[in-house]
Structure formats: C-alpha cells, structure tokens
Image: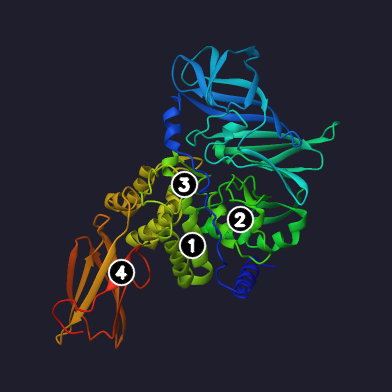
Amino acid sequence: MTKKTRVLSFILFLFLLQSLFAQEIPYDKSGLRYDFRIHLLEAPEHNFDILHYQFEWKINFDASHILGKAVITSRSLIDGLNQIILHLANEMAITGITQSMIPLTYSRRDDLLEIDLIQSINSGEEFSVEINYNGNPQAGLNFSYHQGEPIIWSLDEPIDARHWFPCYDLPNDKATAEMRVTVPGDMQVASNGTLSQVITNSDNTVTYNWKESYQIATYLISVAATNYETYSDFYYSGSKAMEVRYFVYPEHLNQAQQDFSNTVFMIDFFSSVFGEYPFIEEKYGMAVIPPGPAMEHQTCTSYAANLITGNHSYDWIVAHELAHQWWGDLVTPASWADIWLNEGFATYSDALWHEHIYGSDGLKSRMANFKERYYGHIGAEHPIYNPPEGHLFCRIEYDKAAWVLHMLRFVVGDDSFFKILKKYAQDYAYSTASTEDFETVCEQVYGSDLGWFFNQWIYQSGYPTYSFGWGYSEEDKVRVVINQTQTAFPLFKMPVEIKFVLPSGSVKKRFWVEKKNNTFEFFLEGKPSDVSFDPDSWVLCEAERVKKSGRGKR
C-alpha cells in the first residue's frame, strides 16, 4: 500500500467514527502542586555542566526497593571547582561516592547532596563521580499492579527524579544518559532511546540496557516494566525508517492496536509542520502505565491505561503527548516558570492536528473546547508566565496558552507563524529556551516588535470583553463601534475581524482595537444583512452586540 493510499484510507476511517470529539477527561498534571519557586531558591549555583549520566538500577518489586549506581560525567564551568551539588532525596541512603576510585567526602541537607572533589577542576575540564546508593522511593518511581501483574513505572515531572536517582533535577542542564535496568525475569523494560542489550541473569532477573544519545532533561528520564506485549510500526522519512514501538498490557493488546494506529500519521504531520521528528535516529514509543496523567517521556511516552478504549476516543491525547517530543523534549523550558512553552504548545498542536483532519471547523471546535475549559478553571486568574503555587499545571498553562499561540498566528499570519515554529525548534534544538527566547524568534521572523503582544497575554492576566454595534447610512457608509468593557483586567491591543454579509457576498474587515472606546467608519457596496464579530474565533474574548451604535440606521 502506498503512502498516499494509506493516508486516504486513514482519513476515510476517521470520518466513519461515531463522533468528532470524544468526551474529554482531565489530562493536565494539576495534582503535581509543587511551588517551583521554593526549589529555585534552594537550587545551588550551578557551575558545572553535566554531560552524561550512566545509571545501573536493580529494582526489587516485592520490597519497593532500588539498588542504584550513578556515574555522572561533567565539565567545569569555572576555574577552581572543588565541590558539586546534586539533588538526591533523603530516603536514598548513600553507601559510597568515588572519583577515579578514590573515596570522596560529602554532606547532605534536605534534598541536596554536596560532594567534595579530590582536587580543583579548571574551566573546560571533565571529571566523573560515582555514587552508590539504595532505598525505597517515596515518589518518582512507583510500584503497583494491573490485573494482578506487578508494574514498575516512573513519573518525575517536575522534580521527582531526585527521589530515585542522583542528578541535577532542574530542566536547564540536559545530558545524554544510559539506563541499565534489572527487574524480575518475567518483565520487559521500556525506557528512553535505543535498546542495546538484554541480559538474562542467573538469579531469575533480566537486565535491559537503554541508551539515550540525545540530550535529555532529568524529568524526562523514565522506566516502565511489566509483562508487556510489544509490537511495532514504522515511520518513513526519505530513506530512513524509524521504529514506533508500543509496550502494552496483554489484556489491552487489541484495543491498543486500534487506538495507536494513527500515531505514524501524526508523526508525519507534525514533522511537516514543526520539522523532522527530533529523535529519528532512535525511536518513538508508547508504554502503558496505571491510570493517571500521560507523560511525554523522551522517545517513549507513558500512556495511562484508562485511555485505552479501542475506539480512538483519546487520539487528541496521543497527539498532545507526541507533540511534546518537539515542545518540551527537543526544546526544553529554561525553567519551570516557562512551562507554557511545553503545555501550551502541545495543546495547540492537538488543535493543529484536528485542523489537518477536519479543516477550519475542526480547528474552531477544538479552540472552543479550550476556551470552555479555560473559563472553567479553578482558582484565581494569573499570568501565564511564572504561575503561582499550585498552578504549574493548570488550565491557564494549557488552554489559555494554546489560545495565545492561536492569536499569535492571527496577528503574524500563517506563513510567519509556521516559520516561527520551525525556526524556534531549529534554533533551540536539544537545548533549552525561555519565553524571551521564543519572543525573539517571533520578532525575527515577523520583522516587527511583538512586546505588546507578549506583555498583555503572557506577563499579565485576563482577557478582553467587547461590546460592538454597527450602523449604516444611505450613502453606503458604515460605522462600527467596538468598546472594551472589562473591569478586572487592563485594556488589550488586538486586531479583530468583523464579517459583513452583503447582497454580493460576505466581506471581512480587520480593525485594531486598543482603546476603551473605538469607532471605525468606511464605505461598503450595499447594506449588510448581517454583521458578526470575530466570525472565525481568532481572539480569546467575550463579545456582546449592542442594539445601537451612534449615527446611521441598521
């Protein structure tokens, strides 16, 4: 079957689905209520760059215990570096730390591990430390069952990696990683990157060696192990064929094969919009874990079991998590204050997928869903950037942030918007980026200042409410009045469209609205039979039509 035939068959299948959008479930990580500011204040001066993690983990399911070794290779960023500070939770007991086989002294306070090096390291020099430890993780690494079968699985976002392995547990230092995971012999292990080796041990355990050769943030390092059934599909790009590997519960195999059957088409679409799938030399995978949030672990998304239905109900979550491979994994936020660069981008990517399949109606319907969810969010309104305690993963960071990207697209135009996405992905590939970095890319492509847009939509809270009306005179003169009526939020500067239905057809006109009271006068060929505000739903707002609008007759 040719690629074109597959795509046509896929689109036909989608139109045979019973409904356009399935009933939605909460998919954000709102339960992860960390105040990341506290952890930033506690973060030590980071004067070294971690280059590579090499982990060895022997996991005892019955005891919920991990026996671990971490070899961490770093490069000094200063002259005279004589101490490094890592994160490791107190429930992990250290049995020894060495550098070049020489024991090192260390101290611990809270989740910080302060290690004294054997000698001072100058800027640019590399060094490695080996940490041996063990314990019963209280977060991050989890132990549970599915239909009586044991499963081990990790979920570290935002700062739970420290609960089961030593690391610098903030997103601004990415490194390559190797994971050697030993588990009971009847388990298969899914993790990041490529599988290089499987070793059957004499004690009825098995060791899986996974290697992530691309830079990875610690919150994206993952392990999932159970009695998985595995199967594969392939994504083709030019002469390259990349495996798309699925790790599913045996009891869900048939349903999962249905639910995941569109994944390759999604990879193809997002690659065309954002740039090539960023980890094409390794894989994309999906590993089923117990019910809860899905998580965009690099090259191997963890997908909650309750999302497996066999009827494509949650294709939008498959799309959301896949899009994170670009927005979060390829380009990682410089700090948790920039979380919208992950969640807002992935949420809007879901809308782009629906636009790709269902056209403009699909896009409008999806954005209406996001608006409804945002308006129903719990808690006080707050800016998108630097969310307050308890709101790191709230609807403002997902749904409102998606609307910000939608409005940015409206302001700069489709051509510039999609160039922005590709340039942003290219400029910060396998690295980190801040909100300021993204704004800079936007302005470079657009060719004009966008500070006004980011200031009102990212750095302040709220949205505009409009009242509008229109009048018409016999001289074909039209007057449009658009007033901003919000009282809890500042005035906004935005372009808005008005659609006029005329005897000869419809006409759209764009008006820049930035004052409290705005009046626009112009000529039309004929009297409109209907006038509508923001007909294509490009602006996050509420609008009310008023009966009269100054001179002229309606």
Tell me the amino acid under the disc marked 1: Leu
CA gap between label 3 and label 2 equals 19 Å
Circle 1 residue: 352
Question: Does label 1 or label 3 sit earlier along the sequence?
Answer: 1
Spot occupied by residue 172 in the image (x, y as percentages of width and height): 47, 35
Tell me which residue sits at (29%, 88%) in the image: 503
180 horizontally vs 391: left or right: right
Within 10 Å of the Cα at label 2, are there few (<14), some (14-19), or many (20+) other Cα atoms? few
* Residue 333 visible within the image: yes
Circle 2 residue: 238
Tell whether label 3 touches label 1 (CB within 8 Å): no
Tell me the amino acid under the disc marked 2: Gly
* Residue 433 visible within the image: no
Tell me the amino acid under the disc marked 4: Ala
Way the structure is coloured: rainbow
Which mark, residue 426? Answer: 3
Q: Nearer the viewer, mark 1 or mark 3?
A: 1
Displayed quadrant of residue 533? bottom left
Give the structural element (helix, strand or loop) at label 3.
helix
258 horizontally vs 462: left or right: right
Displayed quadrant of residue 253? bottom right
Tell me which residue sits at (40%, 43%) in the image: 388
Tell whether label 4 touches label 1 (CB within 8 Å): no
The N terminus lies in quadrant: bottom right
422 horizontally vs 98: left or right: left
Spot occupied by residue 193 in the image (x, y as percentages of width and height): 64, 42
Question: Does label 1 or label 2 sit earlier along the sequence?
Answer: 2
Which mark, residue 543? Answer: 4
